[in-house]
Image (cartoon, rainbow, N blue to C red):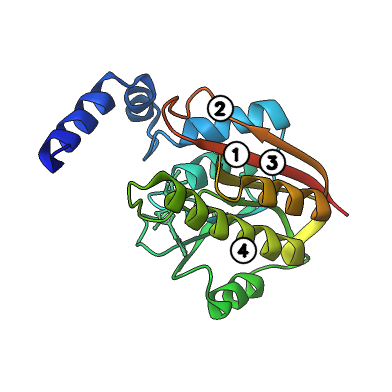
Amino acid sequence: MKKNKISKNWVNKQRRDIYVRQSKVDGYRARSAYKLIEIDEKFKIFKGGMCVIDIGAAPGSWTQYASKIVKNGKIISIDLKEMEKVKNNIQIKGDFTSPLIQDQIKNYLNKGSDVVMSDMAVNTTGIKNIDSIQTGELCKEAMIFSKDVLLEEGSFISKIFMGGSFNEIVALGKKLFKEVKVFKPKSSRKDSKESFIICKNLR
Ligand SMILES: C[S@@+](CC[C@H](N)C(=O)[O-])C[C@H]1O[C@@H](n2cnc3c(N)ncnc32)[C@H](O)[C@@H]1O
């Protein structure tokens, strides 16, 4: 398909999408907020006062939602891109896979973090298997990092793609956490291989 035809299709899809329209009403920067809201409704993740690490946070709709719920808690948001400020929010611009950035995150923690969440995704190549494997690598890195920073009863949430390294990621989740679930929110596009892994209680 030609590039301008793809972008026209994308614009039309966005116009028809109820979550895009709702995000404008609710003041969220991206429709992704509704995926996190559905995850929270089902798995009861967030509470007031919590410390949350949001990896791959820009433009910031997950941080916005977390900020509403944790109120006087703390949210540390990391992204390669600049992000507009959100209340109660510490921002780190850089590559999460860099040990320097991971040390910077750890320096902001007191006892540890209640939640680590990652919606990181690489710039897609359009080749579904490659996209899924690369995003899978980011998910694994975030999961291993979460083992170091989460409090014992903490939660880890991450975007994953079906196929690629899916089974490997679920197996790693089960090795590190007592509870592991995979969930596709209604607001995640049906034609996308995206899903989310939710892990609770470190082993
Ligand atoms: C789908 S968007 C996140 C949307 C966000 N959850 C929201 O609700 O606004 C994925 C983000 O992951 C970021 N990202 C990808 N690789 C990254 C890396 N290695 N380190 C930090 N951020 C990364 C991208 O820059 C992009 O902003």
Quarter of the figure with the C terminus: bottom right
| Label 3 – label 2 distance at C-alpha | 12 Å
Q: Which residue has dot 3 on it?
A: 198
Q: Residues within 10 Å of mark 1 (few under 14, many from 20)?
A: many
Question: x and y percent of residue 132 in the render?
Answer: 49, 49
In-front residue for pair 154/198: 198
**Among numbered discs 2 and 4, the one appearing first in the sequence:** 4
Which residue lies at the image location 58% right of the left edge and 78% below the top edge? 99
| Label 2 – label 4 distance at C-alpha | 23 Å
Q: Which residue has dot 1 on it?
A: 196
Which amino acid type corresponds to the residue marked 3 in the rendered image?
A: Ile
Q: Which residue has dot 4 on it?
A: 141
Q: Is the C-beta of the residue carrying label 1 under 8 Å from the nearest atom of ligand 1?
A: no
Which amino acid type corresponds to the residue marked 2 in the rendered image?
A: Pro
Q: Which residue has dot 2 on it?
A: 185
Which structural element holds mark 4? helix
